Image (cartoon, rainbow, N blue to C red):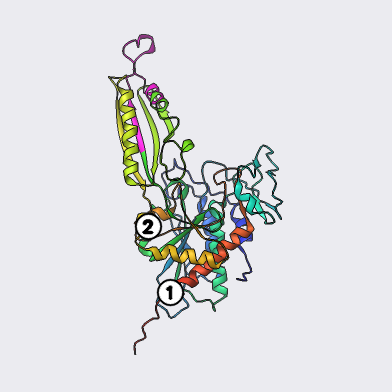
Amino acid sequence: MNINHTVTERFLRYVKIDTQSDPESETCPSTEKQKDLGKILVKELLEIGITDAHLDEHGYVYATLSSNTNKKVPVICWCSHMDTSPDCSGKNVNPIIHEKYNGKDIVLPNDKTQILKVSEHPDLQHQIGNDVITADGTTLLGADNKAGLAEIMDAVHFLKTHPEIKHGTIRILFTPDEEIGRGVDKLDVKKLAADFGYTVDGETAGDIEDETFSADAVNITLHGISTHPGFAKGKMESAIKIAADIVANLPRDTRSPETTELNEGFIHPTSVGGTIEKTVLKFIIRSFSIDGLSRLEAFLKHIIEEVMKSYPKSRFDFDIIEQYRNMKMILEKHPHVTNFALEAIKRSGLEPRLSSIRGGTDGSRLSYMGLPCPNIFAGEHAFHSKLEWVSVQDMHKAVETLVHLAMVWEENSPQAVVTN
C-alpha cells in the first residue's frame, strides 16, 4: 500500500509533550498536562476534516471518521492513550532517529550508561537497515503510547484523503491515565457509540493480543501496638516490622514478577508506608484466570495470618480491589473481531502472531463495557524505561494495518437494504 506517511513527524511532536499520569492524584485526568496533548490532537483532527473532534472535561478525545460506503458496517473504535508512565521521567524528551540501524548496541548520548543492547533486546535484530527512534538516555521516549496515537492519526489522515477506499464509521478515542489503570474511568460509552474496538498499544510488529492478565489490587492495613520505646518490652508490636516480616515471607523463587513468565501469575508488593501504630502495604495480584487470582490472594492472606501469630495483640485488614479482567473471556465470543485484525496484519505484509499480554490495556476494561477490544501492535519496545524505542518502519506497518482493517470490516459487511 502506497501511503505518504505523516506518522513519524506526528510522533516526534507528541513525545515532546510531557503527559505523565500520577497515581497519587484523585482527579481525572490525574495530571492537567495530559490535556495539552489532547488539545493538539483535536486541532490536528479538525485540520484533517474530522469536524466533531473535541476534548471533554475529563481529558478524553472523541472524534468520528464517517462511513463512506452504502454497506451496513458495524462501528469500530480505534483507541490509544495519551499518558506516559510515572515510572520514568517524560519531561524534556529529546527523540533521536538512528538512521539505517547497523545491528550494534546503541549508546544513548546524554547518559552513556544507558545502552540499548542487542543481547537484551532481541527484536533489534529485525531492525537492521531500519530507522530506530530512542530518547537521549535521560527520559523515557513515550512510544507507549504516542506511537499508537501517531499511527491512528496517520491512518485517519490517509483514509480521509483517499475516499476511494471504502470503510464504515470509525470512532477515534484517545484516553488519559491508562498507565495508572484508570484509562476508562470517566469514559462515556454511550457517547462513544461503537460496536467493537481495537487498542493500538502493542509491541512487536505483526502481533495482536487477545488476552490479558486478570488483575486485582490488595491493600493490607496493619494495626500495631504503639507505646513509648523506653518502656516497650512485652507491649510494643510495630506495624512497620509486621510489614517487613510479611514481605520477607513472600516466596523468593516463584509467584513474583522477577521469577514468572508466559501464563504464570504473581504477587507483587508495590508500596509500603506508615508508622508503628498503622502501616499500609499495597500489592498487585495478576493471573490469566479468576481462579488463579483467588488462589494467589488466598496464598497471600495465609502468609499474613502466619506472620500475625507472632503479633497476637495486632490485627490486619485485607481489602481486595478489582482492577480489570482477562479480555479473552469476552473476545472468544466474537472471534471475527480478532480474525479481521489478523487478516489486516497479513495484508500489510507481515506474519500475524496471536499472543497474550502480561499486563493490561484499556481494551481489558472496554471489553467488559460492551466493546470487545483486542490490542494491535504499535511497535513500541522497552516501555517505561530510558531504553524505550520504536522503529519508523514498524510504525508504517501499524498504519497500513489500520487502513487494511477498515477495508476488511467493510468487505465483510452486508449491503444496506434499500427501501422505496
Decide if residue 33 is on the left or right side of residue 266: right
In the displayed structure, does residue 320 sit left or right of residue 14?
A: left
Q: Residue at x 34, y 61 (%)?
A: 333
Q: Nearer the viewer, mark 2 or mark 1?
A: 1
Note whether 387 is above or below 231 in the view shown: below
Q: Is residue 305 above or below residue 2?
A: above
Q: Quadrant of the N terminus?
A: bottom right
* 124 with respect to 217 (left or right): right
Q: Write the residue at 52% across / 41% down.
A: 87
Q: Which mark is residue 367?
A: 2
Say which label, 2 or 1, has the lower sequence index: 2
Decide: marks 2, 1 in contact (CB < 8 A)?
A: no
Q: Nearer the viewer, residue 236 or 106?
A: 106
Q: Return the x and y of residue 245 as percentages of the image width and height.
A: 39, 23
Rate crowding at label 1 as few (under 14), some (14 to 19) or many (20 or more) other CA atoms within 10 Å: few
Q: State which region is magenta.
A: 218-244
Query: Which image quarter is the C terminus in?
Result: bottom left
**218 in relation to 203, above or below:** above
Residue under label 1, please give it: 412
Question: Helix, strand or loop at disc 2?
Answer: helix
**Three-letter amino acid code of the residue under disc 2:** Ser
Q: Residues within 10 Å of mark 2 (few under 14, many from 20)?
A: many
Amino acid bearing label 1: Asn
What is the x, y in percent for residue 242? 37, 23
